[in-house]
Image (tube, rainbow, N blue to C red):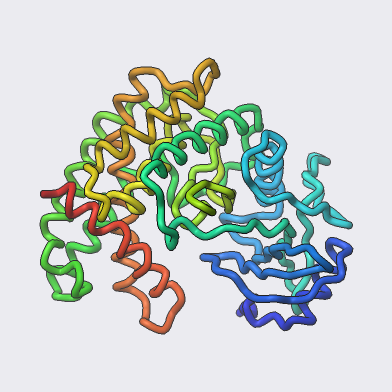
């Protein structure tokens, strides 16, 4: 079994950064991350984020290098993303292409994909006091991101992704069926038990609506590379304004309306449960801002795309709620995945309850 990268010592991280990026850094602290490790390191007056993960079916060196290409396109278009630090010995794909920002290092003789980026200041939107115009800011950001990524070529290899937009309806059905089985056996989180039956029924309903009214249209919608994960844990804010966007790990080709649909679903988790504003009104505010930001560009949505957006956003929200509930049920309390699932569940489930009433 591969060694957990979170057990890397301060000196090991220092050597990895020095060998791969030519910087002499000091380890500060590990940051949050679902798969890759993220460590804040410093050099003189600058701070960076060192990212490392083992290659896998969903993250190959080729794919990581393509993600860095997409990231760079956003950076060069003034989207508030981190500056990437060039690798001293960058990975080069078989095609000869290279972003210049990814390196393959080794930990205990095992290959590890490593990257280094500038550290963005700000507070995660998931823990910040958000202003009333947050949905508008997110819609504007989604529009700018979609425009910035419009000319990025597709990934060289199609990587299977569990959160693929076109599979949203099917994934909701599968996740809700698992929860229904656990409900029947009496194993459900105490905070969602009383409303589980109603929420699962709503999730299955909206998944069916997605499959019958949205999915048949997706192949005919314009396709492009998208970030696809503008969520409240990947957005940084300061003084009520968005200052940063993190994590291009879910970036892939999809129907262009997916960017604003996914972004809207996560705004619901940040605003819909406690703001007093109707979830569907929040989606409308996000999409209106997106349309304003993309006016005059090819990323501006058609009326048909806009008609499909609300169902797509709510279905994605249900996928999150069911997925995190299932994760809480299948992990032990001491596991990081359990705590992460609880945190996400607490932000998604109340909105589903509101929609299901």
Q: Is residue 252 left or right of residue 60?
A: left
Between 355 and 160, the residue placed more toward the observer is 355
Q: Can you give x and y, in whole percent of width and height, for residue 177 in the image?
A: 22, 58
- At horizontal 28% and vertical 42% (from top left) the residue drawn is 314
- At horizontal 80% and vertical 71% (from top left) the residue drawn is 16
Query: Taking 322 as reference, is 229 above or below it?
Result: above
- At horizontal 34% and vertical 18% (from top left) the residue drawn is 303
Q: Quadrant of the N terminus?
A: bottom right
Query: Taking 3 as reference, is 81 above or below it?
Result: above
Which quarter of the figure has residue 108? bottom right
User: Outermost residue toward the top?
Assistant: 296
Q: Can you give x and y, in whole percent of width and height, for residue 110 in the image?
A: 73, 72
- At horizontal 19% and vertical 67% (from top left) the residue drawn is 192
Query: Taking 180 as reference, is 136 above or below it?
Result: above
Which quarter of the figure has residue 148? top right
User: Outermost residue toward the front?
Assistant: 239
Which quarter of the figure has residue 328? bottom left
Q: Is residue 63 left or right of residue 167?
A: right
Q: Can you give x and y, in whole percent of width and height, for residue 137 in the image?
A: 46, 39
Q: Can you give x and y, in whole percent of width and height, for residue 96 in the image?
A: 83, 41
């Amino acid at each position: 079994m591969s060694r957990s990268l979170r057990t890397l010592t301060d000196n090991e991280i220092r050597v990895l950064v020095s060998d791969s990026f030519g910087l002499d850094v000091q380890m500060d602290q590990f940051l949050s991350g679902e798969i890759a490790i993220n460590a804040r390191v410093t050099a003189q007056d600058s701070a960076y984020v060192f990212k490392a993960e083992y290659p896998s079916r969903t993250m190959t060196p080729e794919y990581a290098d393509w993600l860095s290409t997409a990231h760079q396109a956003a950076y060069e278009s003034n989207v508030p993303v981190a500056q990437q630090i060039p690798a001293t010995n960058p990975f080069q794909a078989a095609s000869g292409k290279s972003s210049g920002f990814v390196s393959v290092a080794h930990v205990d003789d095992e290959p590890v994909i490593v990257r280094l980026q500038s550290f963005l200041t700000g507070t995660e939107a998931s823990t910040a006091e958000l202003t009333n115009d947050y949905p508008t800011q997110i819609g504007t950001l989604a529009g700018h991101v979609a425009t910035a990524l419009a000319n990025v070529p597709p990934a060289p290899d199609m990587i299977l992704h569990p959160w693929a937009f076109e599979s949203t309806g099917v994934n909701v059905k599968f996740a809700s069926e698992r929860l229904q089985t656990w409900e029947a056996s009496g194993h459900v989180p105490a905070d969602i038990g009383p409303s589980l039956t109603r929420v699962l029924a709503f999730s299955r309903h909206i998944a069916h609506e997605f499959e019958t009214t949205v999915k048949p249209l997706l192949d005919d919608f314009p396709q492009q590379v998208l970030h696809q994960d503008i969520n409240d844990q990947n957005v940084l804010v300061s003084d009520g304004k968005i200052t940063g966007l993190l994590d291009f790990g879910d970036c892939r080709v999809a129907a262009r309306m997916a960017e604003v649909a996914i972004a809207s679903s996560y705004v619901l988790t940040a605003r819909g449960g406690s703001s007093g504003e109707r979830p569907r009104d929040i989606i409308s505010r996000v999409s209106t801002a997106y349309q304003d930001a993309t006016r005059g560009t090819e990323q501006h949505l058609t009326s048909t795309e806009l008609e499909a957006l609300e169902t797509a956003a709510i279905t994605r929200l249900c996928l999150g709620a069911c997925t995190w509930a299932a994760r809480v049920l299948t992990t032990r309390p001491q596991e990081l995945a359990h705590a992460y699932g609880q945190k996400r569940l607490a932000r998604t489930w109340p909105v589903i309850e509101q929609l299901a009433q």
